[in-house]
Image (cartoon, rainbow, N blue to C red):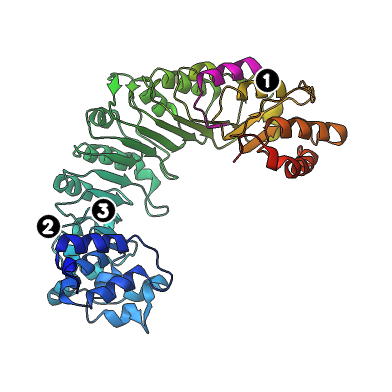
Amino acid sequence: MHQALLVPEVLLEIFAYLNTIPFKTTSTLKLFAALARTCKIFYEPAMDVLWTEIHGLEPLLGCVTRLHPLIYRGGITMWDYDQSWAKGVEPLSAREVHQFLRHSVRVRTLIIQSDHPHLLSVIPAEAYVFPRLKSLNLSITYLNLFLPRMLHQCHQSSVDEGLQSFVTRCIALEHLCIHRTLGIHDIDNTANELSLLSDRIRWCTRLVTLSCPMLDWETWKHLSHLPTLLKLKIDRGLEYEDPPSLSNRDLVNLSFLNITSLSFLQLYDSANIIIVMQHSQFPSLKNFKFQAFYLSLEEAEQLLHALSHCKACRTLEEIIICCLEVRRELEYPEFLTPTPHLLCFTQLRTLQLMFTDFYIYLDNDLLLQAMSIWPHIRTLKINYSDASMSSSDSEVTLHGLFTALSLCPHLHTLQVPINTAIIDVDPDAEPIQHTSLRSLELETSDPEIVDADAENLAGIISAWLPCIDRVRSMGRSWHEVNVHLRSFGAATAPYIVGAS
């Protein structure tokens, strides 16, 4: 054996590297199991890698002599196929607990997906059975069994009084993700559970990332005082239909100094979130995502206005706002003009907007102004639930589109409504090629562009956007154009200037 392998630091570096390599002939687990059996020097570091990340309790329960044949039948891991293997099985004895915990000190990441906590009923609730654990993913059923002093990351799937013990004993918690599992909880208890959740999260003082349902105002104030908090995601989930309301009585302006990523997902009622945004500042914010099942025109205006005043004008790079449901038929068209609210974000790289119950107004002048302020933009998507909304009353023409594109050389993905009734680009004019654009989706009111117009449009697009061989759309409007585009692309590809 080479003398270098006798140096623990060197051996750990080698094993860490091996753990990153995908092997074709054998699994990584089998590799480290073989290394552990090779010699005494390899045993400890190999076993540490082998047990560092455990999915399910079964690998640990498999160390119990009585349970091993139930879990590994004929060399097959039965829990992958039959979750009922533990039904009727007696709990671990005090002696068997030591077998179960044989390798627990090595475990850093534990993901519990099974549902047989009765087997572990003999383990004291106050026991720190995984002292080096850093990442934990579990349901509330197991919460009091796995509360290590070294815990840095936790992902639990439900909320109850056990969370108080959890956060009290895990003050150094850095990563916390809490959600509810469908079908397990009574929706009538939602408000009480969320109130309890808010109260318990205020025990956490070192959070770096947090994902949870809606919180009360006191918890928002608590989070604003955490200098460690970088990422915050409010994911209401499908069962949270009665969030705690935020009263206007005690609202004060909050400043989340270091948050870089802010997400609001699966919102049924956006009013509370808009209130939070109206009273908050995020001077370090880079990514903002807002996903609601419904958003009225008034709420959309309020949200955009609040976003433009949250002190993120020099930092925000990604904005994604979308609605998921159509609530009403539009008797008269209603228009939202979001561009003026967004012009302050000079570092914008990604902008995606999708609304279902009103139109987004965009014309050549607004598009040109936006692109002149967003020189770093890479993705621009103005999306709709159907093609008729996107193309109706569109004021963007091909000439306006190409003029705006000349100001954003890094744009890769573009989706906007366009007016093809008038082709205002001279097919014989010298084109200014945009060679970064790779994905183009244009919605038009024409059900299908055919005959001479299709060939003419294909020639113009091929000349100005040489890397585009297909225009995507919700319908078949661009089918004939795409046929011509493919033929033009095949003929001109070797001569595209700047294309890679």
Residue 44 shows in this picture:
yes
User: Closer to the N terminus: mark 3 or mark 2?
Assistant: 2
Residue 422 on image: x %, y %: 79, 22
Badge 1 density bin: few <14, some 14–19, many ≥20, Cα 10 Å = some
**Residue at 42% across, 20% down:** 306
Disc 1 target residue? 400
Residue type indicated by callout 3: Ser
Residue 78 on image: x %, y %: 38, 76
Residues at circles 3 and 2 in contact by the CB criterion of under 8 Å: no
Question: Could you tell me which quadrant the N terminus lies in?
Answer: bottom left
Residue type indicated by callout 1: Gly
Disc 3 target residue? 135
Residue 360 shows in this picture:
no
Tell me: residue 16, above or below residue 76: above
User: Closer to the N terminus: mark 3 or mark 1?
Assistant: 3
Disc 2 target residue? 126
Badge 2 density bin: few <14, some 14–19, many ≥20, Cα 10 Å = few
Residue 291 on image: x %, y %: 48, 35
Q: Quarter of the image holding residue 41?
A: bottom left
Q: Nearer the viewer, mark 3 or mark 1?
A: 1
Tell me: residue 44, above or below residue 241: below
Q: Nearer the viewer, mark 1 or mark 2?
A: 1
Residue type indicated by callout 2: Glu
Secondary structure, mark 1, is helix
As for residue 376 lying within the magenta part, the answer is yes
Tell me: residue 202, above or below residue 403: below
Q: Which residues are magenta?
A: 364-380
**Residue at 61% across, 28% down:** 357
